[in-house]
Amino acid sequence: METNPYYRSFKHTLLLSFVLVIPFLILCVMGIFDSYILQVFDTSIGSLFYNRGSDLLTKIVIAFTTIGNPMSVALIVLAIAVLVLVIQRDWKSTLWYILTVFLGAAVLNSLVKNVFQRVRPELTHLIEQEGHSFPSGHAMGAVIYFGALAYLIYYFSQNKSSQVKQSLMGLTVIFVLLMGISRLYLGVHYPSDVLGGYSLGSAFLVLAIDYHRRWLHANKSSKF
């Protein structure tokens, strides 16, 4: 019997996910041992972005970063889920998107935050922000919910050209980078928080996308 190609590629998916999570693991070790290198990295990189603009820019950054707030994410995810269900009539992809964002951006991020309980930077926060600092929920969430959205757009696209794929990847990278920079600008996260969120979120997203592909391949009757 011929082996399912998606199952054959699962080892590659695990390897890619492991590579992506390496920065997060390194930051965890450095944080545990209170590394001087980590302190220098956070101080030097963070100073490049913290409150480096006009009042107008600050207002724009504050407005942009609200896209990553839990309530905003919940509304966005709900809207996307409804669109996928109504337009594509694909309940599996709808459920996959909701669970991917919920388990990755909410549950996993909260668990890791509670494990490390890192205090936020001792800066004047330009917005009110509660909770722990590492890893950044906004950075991690942006990778997961925007990355998963880009994947679904490509998945349902009639024109699966490399140009479409590259455009979606480019938009995702730009959005994720801007979200991370906004957290540094507002003084509510260290650069290592943002990097850790990127790393852990990317590793989780890769596994989630692989599961979506294998799940639907195993049962083509996923639509109404």
Image (cartoon, rainbow, N blue to C red):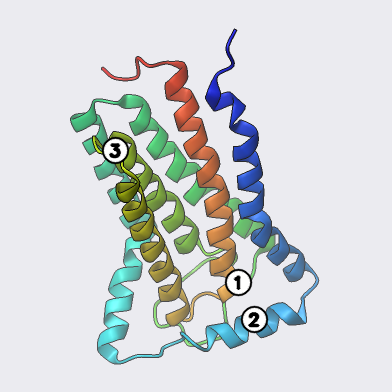
> Rounded to the nearest whole Å, what is the CA distance between mark 1 and mark 3?
32 Å
Of residues 68 and 114, the one drawn nearer to the viewer in this rendering: 68
Kind of element beneath mark 2: helix
Kind of element beneath mark 1: helix
Q: Quadrant of the N terminus?
A: top right
In the depicted structure, whether residue 126 falls above or below residue 77: below
Disc 2 crowd rating (10 Å Cα; few below 14, some 14-19, many 20+) is some
Mark 2 or 3, nearer chain start: 2
Q: Residue at x 31, y 42 (%)?
A: 161
Judge from the rendering whether residue 129 lies leftward or rightward of residue 2; answer left or right: left
> Rounded to the nearest whole Å, what is the CA distance between mark 1 and mark 2?
8 Å
Query: Is there a contact, CB below 8 Å, between mark 1 and mark 2?
Result: yes
Furthest residue in direction top, as rendered: 1
What mark, if any, has residue 192 been given in the picture? 1
Disc 3 crowd rating (10 Å Cα; few below 14, some 14-19, many 20+) is many
**Residue 186 in sight here:** no
In the depicted structure, whether residue 33 falls above or below residue 125: above
Q: Residue at x 50, y 88 (%)?
A: 48
Indicate the position of residue 181 as horizontal and vertical percent values: 44, 75
Indicate the position of residue 208 as horizontal and vertical percent values: 50, 38
Judge from the rendering whether residue 59 lies leftward or rightward of residue 69; answer left or right: left
Indicate the position of residue 110 as horizontal and vertical percent values: 56, 54
Q: Amino acid at mark 3?
A: Ala
What residue does disc 2 label? 41
What residue does disc 3 label? 81
Q: Residue at x 31, y 50 (%)?
A: 163
